[in-house]
Amino acid sequence: MDYAIIGGTGVYTPLLFEREEEQFVKTPYGNVTCKTGSYQKRDIVFIARHNSEHKIPPHKINYAANIWALKHLGVKCIIATNAVGSANREIGVGDFVIIDQFLDFTKSRRCTFFNGENTPVVHVDVTDPYCSTLRKLLIDVGGDLGLKIHERGCYACFEGPRYETAAEIKMVGMLGGDVVGMTNVPEVVLAREAGICYAAVCVVTNMGAGISEGILKHKEVSELMAKNIDKVRLLALETLTAVPDDICCSCKQSGFSLPGMEES
């Protein structure tokens, strides 16, 4: 299984898989349920980040278990999907953003596989946190599909599950952030520690607090994602089919041997 999709809000099933099967992976951090199947002759793993019924809030997602499980299954490339709010008036509702940087405002999450207790201490390079090869493929495939794509964007990750205040959205804009969400960090960092190519496609479901005309509701976010769900799935799947077998990037070189992987 060289390829994986991590589905965020609204993306709870791969749908377009052939020979879909459910699989359970035991990890040092907890068990993971995923679906495996194929699309255009490529074997792909799918994980619903919030589970298939959206019962796991963003601050309680077991990011370490998910990434460890994908590494255990042999995954080399991950496309993640994220529903986001916009902190940039030039990025509107329904737009797709292929993020290239992040700001981390999370507070209580396990942010590394290497906590220094029963593991070595490591310092992973995240100068460019998202795989440049996967990002370019997402941009090219998105263009071919006729999607409104923003080729760059900075993702500000908050702890959640509450939405951001108007002051926080203003702060994000001042710091150069473009979109806000609750799930991309530490997922992207853990993928880099694991040496897995990782890129994320963000769908703007609402304008941020203080920019939007009314209060923010999860129902409205879900409804907007439902309108774009087929486009999101197709973009992720078509991008993975376009990944060259000899993908050339530095993601793998930045990774480390994960704790417990040798004994798995």
Image (tube, rainbow, N blue to C red):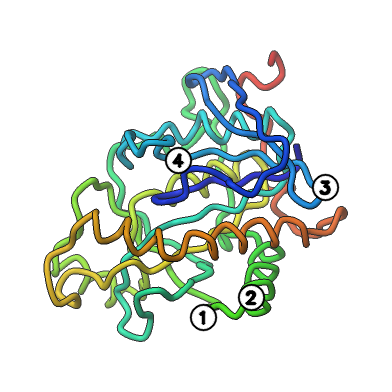
Spatial distance from mark 2 to mark 1, Cα to Cα? 9 Å
Disc 1 marks a residue whose amino acid type is Lys
Query: How many dots with numbers?
Result: 4
Task: Identify the mark nearer the N-term, 4 or 2.
Answer: 4
**Disc 1 vs disc 3: which is toward the camera?**
3
Residue contact between numbered discs 4 and 2, judged by CB atoms under 8 Å: no
Residue 50 place in picture, x, y as percent? 39, 39
What element does badge 1 sit on? loop
Q: Residue furthest right?
A: 246
Residue contact between numbered discs 3 and 4, judged by CB atoms under 8 Å: no
Residue displayed at 68% across by 72% down: 141
Spatial distance from mark 4 to mark 2, Cα to Cα? 25 Å
Q: Quarter-wise, where is residue 6 in the image? A: top right
Q: Which label belongs to residue 41?
A: 3
Residue contact between numbered discs 3 and 2, judged by CB atoms under 8 Å: no
- Residue 61 lies, with reference to residue 89, above or below; the image says above
Q: Residue furthest bottom?
A: 90
Residue 65 place in picture, x, y as percent? 51, 28
Q: Which image quadrant: the C terminus?
A: top right
- Residue 128 lies, with reference to residue 25, above or below; the image says below
According to the picture, the residue beneath numbered tag 4 turns out to be: 49
Depth check: 208 or 44 in front?
44
How would you rate the neighbour count of disc 1 (Cα within 10 Å): few for under 14, some for 14-19, many for 20 or more?
Answer: some
According to the picture, the residue beneath numbered tag 2 turns out to be: 145
Q: Which label belongs to residue 148?
A: 1
What element does badge 3 sit on? loop
Q: Quarter-wise, where is residue 108 in the image? A: top left
Task: Identify the mark nearer the N-term, 3 or 4.
Answer: 3
**Disc 2 vs disc 1: which is toward the camera?**
2
Task: Identify the mark nearer the N-term, 3 or 2.
Answer: 3
Spatial distance from mark 3 to mark 4, Cα to Cα? 24 Å
Residue displayed at 35% across by 39% down: 54
